[in-house]
């Protein structure tokens, strides 16, 4: 899809473009379809449109997430300078900025748990390796979490701002 043909969305006072999910990947209720041959997929659609996190350093947070979660296709997609500070949008494989980092507004305790979908168990393992390489604290090494469901495979780690971040792969059906 050519950049000039992508849909335009309003972000504050700025108009930006990013790729939309093709209608062929949607079912009648508008949710995203899983790949037809895959037993491993997400929940069939996105529950969250986006999440914005306050951070001491938006650029450092974006660099950390792009490095550690590269196996999930996480990359910077937008950068907006605002009077209160830098705001950065991070996208996954769909190119839509679902995760945002902005300036710290409230310095109080604000830990968040964020789970990012991984396309495979191998991707979860690559996230864990990248987190260790980035000197991130691993809260729980990659493993199955049958208490959630039999095919729940995840790693939990601490990001530079103290948030509990997870990379999770769901294998429904065969385990």
Image (cartoon, grey):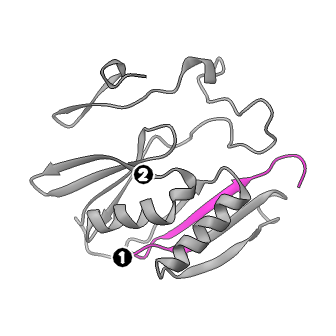
Q: Which residue is mark 1?
A: 109
| Residue count near mark 2 (Cα–Cα under 10 Å), binned few <14, some 14–19, many ≥20 | many
Numbered range of the magenta stretch: 156-175
Residue found 56% across the figure and 41% down from its top: 47
Is 104 or 132 nearer to us in this picture?
A: 132
Q: Nearer the viewer, residue 167 or 47?
A: 167
Q: Quadrant of the N terminus?
A: top left
Please give the name of the residue rendered at 26% of the width and 71% of the height, measured from the top-left corner: 56
Mark 2 or 1, nearer chain start = 2
The magenta stretch spans residue 46: no
- Residue 7, percent from left and from top: 35, 22
Residue count near mark 1 (Cα–Cα under 10 Å), binned few <14, some 14–19, many ≥20:
few
Give the side of residue 126 with respect to residue 14, left or right: right
**Residue 129 lies in quadrant:** bottom right
Q: Secondary structure at mark 1?
A: loop
Is 116 positioned to the left or the right of 34 in the image? Answer: left
Q: Nearer the viewer, residue 35 or 33?
A: 35
């Amino acid at each position: 899809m050519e950049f000039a043909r992508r849909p335009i969305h309003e972000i504050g006072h700025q108009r930006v473009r990013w790729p939309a999910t093709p209608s062929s990947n949607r079912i009648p209720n508008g949710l995203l379809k899983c790949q037809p041959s895959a037993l491993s997929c997400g929940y069939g659609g996105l529950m969250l449109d986006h999440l914005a996190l306050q951070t001491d350093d938006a650029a450092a947070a974006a660099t950390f997430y792009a490095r550690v979660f590269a196996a999930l296709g996480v990359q910077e997609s937008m950068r907006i300078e605002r009077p209160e500070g830098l705001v950065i949008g991070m996208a996954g494989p769909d190119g839509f900025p679902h995760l945002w980092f902005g300036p710290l507004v409230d310095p109080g305790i604000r830990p968040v748990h964020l789970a990012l979908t991984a396309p495979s168990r191998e991707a979860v393992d690559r996230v864990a390796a990248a987190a260790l390489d980035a000197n991130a604290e691993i809260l729980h090494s990659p493993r199955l979490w049958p208490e959630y469901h039999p095919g729940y495979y995840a790693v939990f780690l601490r990001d530079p701002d103290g948030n509990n971040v997870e990379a999770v792969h769901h294998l429904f059906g065969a385990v």
